[in-house]
Structure formats: C-alpha cells, structure tokens
Image: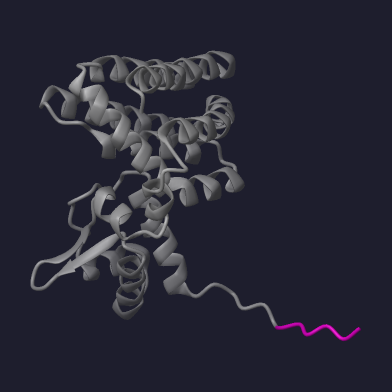
Amino acid sequence: MSVSLHPIQPKSIAEQVFEQLRDLIFRGYFKPGEKLPPERELAASLSVSRPTIKTAITKLVNKGLVEQRQGQGSFVRSQQSQYMDNPLREVMDSEEVDLDDLLEVRSGMEVNAVRLAAERATPQDIRILDSCVQDMLSKVDQGLVGADEDVAFHMAIAYATKNPAQIFLMKHFYDLLFYGIRESRFHLYESGNLQRMGDQHAAILERIRAHDPDGAEEAMLRHIHFVQDFCHSRGL
C-alpha cells in the first residue's frame, strides 16, 4: 500500500512567539484588559523582528485572546468575551450540559493535576499561584466576583504539573472552565460565600507550597465538593 508522507516542517519563529505569548495570557502574566508591551519592546525582549511580533499578535487576535485598538495598542481580552466568541459556548448553552457535569470533569482533571503540581511546582510556579490567590481575594474585597483570577489559578496549577498532556487538555478546556467558574462564583457571590472560596484556594496553595500531594488532593476535593454541594442546593 502506498503511503503519502510529507516532510516535517519546523515551527516558525512567529509560531513560537505566539505560543509563548498565549501561555503568558493563560497563566495570568498578562491579565484581561491589560495592554501588551509595545511591538518594539517585545521584539527586543524576544530577539526577533517586529514583523514576526505582528504575525504572532495577529494570530492571538484571530484566536480571540487579544484585541487591537487603533492608536492604542493590543489588549488582552476578558475571558467573558473569549467565551462569547467560542463555538464551545453552544455546548454550555444547551440544556444537555450543566455545572455539575463540568464539575465532574474538573474533579478528574484537577485532582490529578494538583497532585503533580504539589510534587513538581517550582518557586516560580508558587509565586504565580500566590499572586492569583492574592488578586482573587483583592477582587472579593472590592465586591467583585474574581472569575478571571480563579481561572488563572487553576491554569497555573496545570502549568505547574510540567506535564505537556495535562497542559494541553486544560488549554482546550479553558473556555468551559471559565464558564463553569464564572457561573458558580456569581451564585456564590450572591450567597456571600466567596470568602470561603478564597480560603479554599489558599488551602490548596499551601499544600502545593509544602509539596504535599495527599494534602493538595484533599484540599482540591474539598473545594470541588463544596461547589458541587452548593450547586445541588440551588438546583443549578
């Protein structure tokens, strides 16, 4: 049988720049609404040409992660706007999928992820997670929901696993993750439970910081079960 094979093409420099910037957005380095550094600055930092930066940013725009404002620059889009433009919205807008379905999936993915993160997290990973928790608590203190910061925390756990497959799955689960977190936090906000959520995230972080896989797993399960029980009690 004749098989048609094609030469393997190495990743272009622009593709590598795109992936690096995308990961910085996913990890919360560049936050929703924040302006990206100027193209000249990015080009100098990454040792690439400005046309390469333009190509990478165009791809970020096409993926719905960044928007360009004439005369102002490139800005990270909110997860809300990303979700609204994503085909996965149809999955969550259907009556066939609810928050409990999402939480069941998250339980499987994130319990495994938090164990690996507790084993493998670097000091930099822990600093990122700590920043996410502090930003989340700050938003709650301001009377805000803090969904963006919550998502960034869970994405940071995925990156801390150092497992490319886990990171890949979480990237592609990103929109559904944001939808579920946004919806549950909105209802938790109305019931005055967001401070408890902040305490639960802090507990997860402390077990990761202590490199305690069993403790991290228990903390993550308590967190997810708390949200599940709350959603069940509200018929969500």
Q: Nearer the viewer, residue 65 or 12?
A: 65
Q: How far across and down, in percent of the image, does residue 130 sit?
A: 33, 27
Q: Residue pushed farthest front?
A: 95
* Above/below status of 50 relative to 171: below
Instruction: Indicate the colouring scheme.
Output: one colour
Query: Which residue sits at x=29%, y=20%?
Result: 198
Q: Quadrant of residue 65?
A: bottom left
Q: Is residue 41 magenta?
A: no
Q: Quadrant of the C terminus?
A: top left
Q: Main secondary structure of the magenta part?
A: loop
Q: How far across and down, in percent of the image, does residue 123 sit?
A: 43, 30
* Above/below status of 3 relative to 118: below
Q: Is residue 33 left or right of residue 164?
A: left
Please give the count of numbered marks on the rendered protein.
0
Q: Is residue 78 left or right of residue 2?
A: left
Q: Quadrant of the N terminus?
A: bottom right
Q: How far across and down, in percent of the image, does residue 210 sit?
A: 49, 16
Query: Which residue sits at x=29%, y=55%?
Result: 84
Query: Which residue sits at x=50%, y=75%?
Result: 12
Q: Residue pushed farthest right?
A: 1
Query: Which residue sits at x=57%, y=43%?
Result: 166
Q: How far across and down, in percent of the image, does residue 175 sit?
A: 39, 49
* Above/below status of 108 relative to 20: above
Q: Nearer the viewer, residue 33 or 102?
A: 102
Q: Is residue 204 left or right of residue 28?
A: right
The boundaries of the magenta stretch are 1-6
Q: Is residue 2 magenta?
A: yes
Q: Is residue 121 left or right of residue 163?
A: left
* Above/below status of 74 relative to 225: below
Q: Residue pushed farthest left?
A: 71
